[in-house]
Image: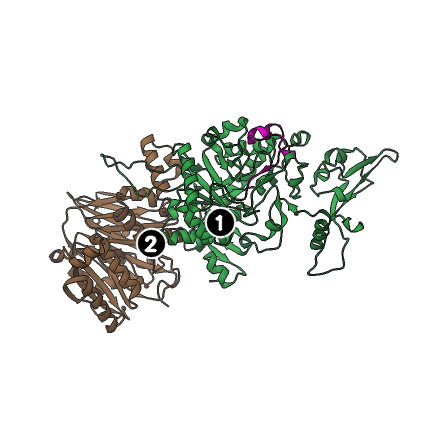
Amino acid sequence: MPVNYLYPEYEIVRNYDRCIVCRACERQCANEAHEYLEDKNKMVCDDAKCVNCHRCVSLCPTRALKIVKSDHTFKENGNWTKKIINEVYKQAGSGGVLLSSMGNPEHYPVYFDKILLNASQVTNPPIDPLREPMETKVFLGAKPAKIERDENGKLKRNTPPHLTLSMPIMFSAMSYGSISYNAHESLARAAKELGILYNTGEGGLHEDFAQYGENTIVQVASGRFGVHTTYLNTGAAVEIKMGQGAKPGIGGHLPGTKIVGDVSKTRMIPEGSDSISPAPHHDIYSIEDLRQLVYSLKEATAYTKPVIVKIAAVHNISAIASGIARSGADIISIDGFRGGTGAAPTRIRDNVGIPIELALASVDKRLRDEGIRDNVSIVVGGSIRSSADIVKAVALGADCVYIGTSALLAIGCHLCRSCQTGKCNWGIATQREDLVKRLNPNIGYKRLVNLMTAWQHEIKEMMGGMGINSIESLRGNRLMLRGVGLNEKELEILGINHAGE
Amino acid sequence: MREGMFRNPSGCAISGIFSKSGERFTGERIIDSITVMHDRSNGLGGGFAAYGIYPEYKDYYAFHIFYDNKSVKDTTEKFLEEHFDIINLSKIPTRKMKSITDEPLIWRYFVTPLHTKLASSQLDEREFVAKCVFKVNTRIDGAYIFSSGKNMGVFKAVGFPEDVGRFYRLEDYAGYCFTAHGRYPTNTPGWWGGAHPFALLDYSVVHNGEISSYDANRRSIEMYGYKCTLQTDTEVITYIIDYLHRKIGLTLKEICSVIAAPFWSTIERKPEEERAELEYLRNTFSSQLITGPFSILVGFEGGLMALNDRLKLRSMVVGEKDSTVYIASEEAAIRVIQQDLDKVWAPKGGEGVIVTLDGGNI
């Protein structure tokens, strides 16, 4: 039926005056959008296959290519947009759930963009990070409930297991399987060089990466793929994944086409079988069950490693976080509704969860009101896009942030949001060997180190401007923030004043 | 408008005199010292803390209270009677001065907690007293207990410090330690309670600076049951010191390593044992780190501590002559009362100077 034909959203524009028919675009496109016509010695393309990943554009030696938004249009309608109409056609044709990748792209408010930072003028001096020490080191984990002294009066080291980071940033959970071996290697090596941590996600830990254990958070999710005692003890911390910002309330799904070779071995499931994690952990139906898993993992690791509980930011977040803070967890990680994913049902991704800024502000306040903020550290993600977002998150009350999308951008992701197809032309969200090798981990890791180093510099500059020379004095320091264009309720939840106040 | 309704940063002058031998001297010297730094204040607040001034009542908490009016005084006294045995009460003697105006009612009470109340509260005595002070200051509008320690007292007002000293007739008091503060607030509603020193129990703090960590410190200390009603740096610093010293049990030296912690680059160069301890303190009490410029004098029973921020962004000089220690924002403020010093130096940023009575302990 002709209604199944959807005019492509993007068009590939080729400048034939520049095209030298080298066929690089054809070789580079895993979606086979480009084709060589031998009889005409000419390149042509099928816009319908293009995902707008810019691989061909970036590699075209004569800059003959560009991708433009199609001006093809339905009769304009403020309610029935092109996107919605197309989705109806798609589902009427397939009978299936719509799938998407990466974070929620819809036009919800981005609170970080409505918050401004302070700087010192006259009454106290800004501090120049080029001339004075400027500290970004953070510890994550519970604080000792009280001090203890030995018989000589010396303070005992009674700090519960914790993580030490050179800056308040970690790479968030992305499984081996959802992303490639080379992507994981880039993240692991960068984390080690930077003195931070990356996270295995729910895909187990490839044995080659055990050497980066001190910089690894090993995740335990509802499918328990790849979980065993050695795995738990290899990492520096264990993260229980209860939920993910991109798809709160549902489990993960890695298609069988990605479960090949080492991915299957690492996950400890047969090749080609879909890797489907259930929506709940089947041993956690309430908060008291979570406590049991927290302590099971602590037993398994002999109480030497902090346990992180990761949850999606949902409506009742502060009560949930308060429960977790009393459950033995050392760190709570909260993933906002804009958090990325390798694949999620579109409707869930675009309609479930709440903004991380509001979730963070509310959790930090609740834990303080209840006097249990020292029980846990707070890590937030979804989505942290820049060093300014980090400074704002820390000032709202976060100890640290998780970054996923920005880390992938650093190693080549162009945010085409097609990870679920497994044909990532940049060698990131794919297991196809020819594509994976396009991502050179020697370059990938270096770019991650560059990005983090740049952000650390910027964080120091912003802190210095505020007259703060250590990150802990920024944490929860909401007087350093002012809102612009926010209503009373939003300001109240964020716990900040409006600009001009 | 009243102090506490908005954030109120200020610049200032501080001065302190401490006699290690315990020899008592009158308040005249501290007035002479702070007078020299007249230009460091702007007439919007001055005050003094004096230790060892009530030897005849040394076992009783001395409450100094501002009242807006008579009815608030009655309400407060009713509360005090319910919780304390009041041994003595009187108006604090003052001298009429042209430059000091709008004075509230200023009263002094020597009190001791009622046994029954104390026992039923299940608190230790000092915590009980602190809780009562908070109750009055936050719940009784128009009453403000600005001094609550034993054998010590705070005297403060809106005005230049030298005038405030004369207003309170400090020459009539003799103690082993005096501290003084001249205030240069960037804005103030001119409320007497907002002047410094700020005190809780026998801890008193005078402070020069504007800390950048204010809200991080405030939000963390409020979690431990303190209520920052004045929105001033000095208030939050006082609570942090009270919390770390009285409630947690850190030594003053350890407290210096928390609130003006050495930089990590410095810590890394220390021997293993010391490094581990400093890291422990910085990690455990990370929310009590204070950044931004400050110099503070912390008075407490039997001692005085001086501390600068970690970068030393405010001036502070220490001088010694025989058994007397002088500390001030400017050396001139020391020289004016003691020309002949055995030793004079500027402590480094984060380097606490702690002096105590000979034979006493901290």
Look at the image and give the residue range highlighted in magenta: A257-278
Q: Is residue A449 left or right of residue B211?
A: right
Whole-percent x and y of residue A188? 53, 32
A500, above or below A106, in the image:
below
| Callout in the foreground (2, 1) | 1
Write down the residue under mark 1: A393
Query: Is A266 part of what is drawn in magenta?
Result: yes
Amino acid at the residue labelled 1 = Ala
Amino acid at the residue labelled 2 = Val
Write down the residue under mark 2: B236
Q: For this rendering, which residue is in front, A445 or B172?
A: A445
The residue under the point 38% across, 34% down is A303
Chain A colour in the picture: green
Chain in brown in the render: B
Measure the C-alpha gap from mark 2 to mark 1.
Answer: 23 Å
Query: Is B75 part of what is drawn in magenta?
Result: no
Chain ID at mark 2: B
The residue under the point 26% across, 53% down is B15
Q: Secondary structure at mark 1?
A: helix
Which label number is shown at residue B99? none
Q: Is residue A186 left or right of residue B31?
A: right
Chain ID at mark 1: A
Residue B315 showing in the rendered view: yes
Q: For this rendering, which residue is in front, A172 or B241?
A: A172
Whole-percent x and y of residue A492? 46, 60
